[in-house]
Image (cartoon, rainbow, N blue to C red):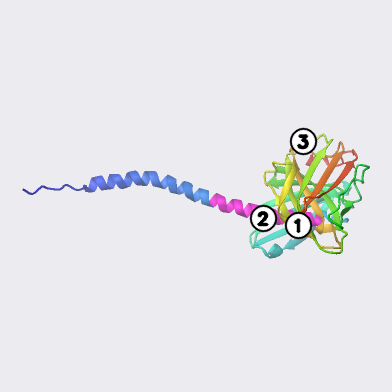
């Protein structure tokens, strides 16, 4: 006796497709948005890193040629450093403050006028030595060679904006370092960084740049203290690293604070070398009047 096998009806198939579509369409849209957000995040990080690099170069200069308020000196860099991004640098006197300049670094995708990242920093037009070696300064030798810090540059303040909203505030400690040895290079594998005695509670260390290259970066600035570089920094023998090649330690501080070093404090850095020895340097920073203009506080 033959049995009759019953298949799916057209209505059942259509209803099944409808249910699957109801489920899959939102899921697919969510996946598309997720992929799009990852791509946007990568663009933001890359543009931000390039803007940070240019800002570090500008802040390493002891004198800045600035335009008058409202008429800045503008420099445009297409395909900055060989990347698919354009950068615009703007330097002008900060309002009625003749000794203070405003620096803006804006990043765009190459050939586009859509702003991705803008960094704004305020610093003195001419920098002088901000700190000095203290009695508790000490160093430990790496074999027969030594690493010396020959100058501590005045800290610079940076404000990062998204549109007109301030999203981050940073202070950068820049120091000129020298490897006095003549027999070979020295590898710096990490550092210990801390600021004490300040009225500001720092969030943490954002980045370490030496010789124009980044050796440590934490976008969330979660840590202060001992850090290990992503790769060792090799100091060439009988070489000084200053200006744009100086060692720059960038720390993030709360949005509610306008000048983190207004009350003074102590900045300490210890370099970790490949043979586990260290070089410790410490400065006491004097308290000073908050000379930032009202509109950036």
The location of residue 129, given as percent across then percent down, is 91, 49
Where residue 47 is drawn, which disc sits there? 2
Task: Provide the secondary structure element on which disc 2 rests.
Answer: helix
Foreground: disc 2 or disc 3? 3
Q: Earlier in the sequence, mark 2 or mark 3?
A: 2
Give the residue number, with chain letter if any, for mark 3: 201
Task: Provide the secondary structure element on which disc 3 rests.
Answer: loop
Give the residue number, with chain letter if any, for mark 1: 233
Label 2, residues with CA under 10 Å away: few <14, some 14-19, many ≥20: many
Q: Is residue 204 above or below residue 82?
A: above
Q: Quadrant of residue 297?
A: top right
Q: Residue furthest right?
A: 135
Q: Earlier in the sequence, mark 3 or mark 1?
A: 3
Question: What secondary structure prevails in the magenta region?
Answer: helix
The location of residue 37, given as percent across then percent down, is 56, 49
Magenta part of the chain: 36-58
Q: Is 9 in front, or is 89?
A: 9
Compared across the picture, whether 283 is left or right of 164 comes to right
């Amino acid at each position: 006796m033959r049995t009759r096998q019953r298949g799916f009806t057209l209505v059942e198939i259509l209803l099944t497709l409808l249910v699957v579509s109801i489920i899959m369409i939102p899921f697919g849209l969510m996946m598309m948005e997720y992929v799009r957000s990852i791509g946007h995040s990568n663009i933001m990080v890359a543009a931000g890193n390039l803007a940070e690099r240019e800002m570090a170069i500008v802040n390493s200069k002891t004198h800045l040629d600035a335009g008058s308020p409202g008429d800045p000196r503008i420099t445009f860099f297409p395909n900055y450093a060989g990347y698919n991004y354009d950068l615009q640098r703007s330097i002008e006197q900060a309002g009625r403050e003749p000794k203070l300049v405003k620096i803006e670094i804006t990043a765009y995708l190459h050939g586009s006028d859509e702003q991705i990242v803008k960094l704004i920093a305020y610093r003195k037009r001419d920098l002088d030595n901000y700190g000095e070696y203290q009695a508790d300064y000490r160093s430990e030798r790496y074999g027969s060679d030594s690493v010396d810090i020959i100058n501590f540059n005045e800290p610079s303040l940076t404000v990062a904006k998204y549109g007109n909203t301030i999203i981050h505030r940073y202070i950068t400690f820049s120091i000129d370092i020298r490897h006095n040895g003549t027999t070979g290079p020295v590898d710096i594998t990490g550092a210990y960084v801390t600021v004490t005695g300040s009225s500001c509670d720092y969030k943490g260390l954002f980045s370490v740049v030496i010789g124009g290259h980044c050796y440590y970066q934490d976008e969330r600035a979660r840590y202060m203290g001992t850090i290990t570089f992503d790769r060792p920094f090799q100091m060439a023998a009988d070489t000084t690293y200053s200006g744009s090649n100086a060692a720059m330690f960038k720390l993030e501080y709360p949005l509610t604070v306008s000048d983190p070093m207004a009350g003074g404090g102590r900045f300490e850095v210890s370099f970790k070398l490949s043979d586990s020895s260290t070089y410790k340097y410490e400065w006491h920073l004097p308290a000073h009047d908050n000379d930032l203009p009202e509109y950036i506080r």
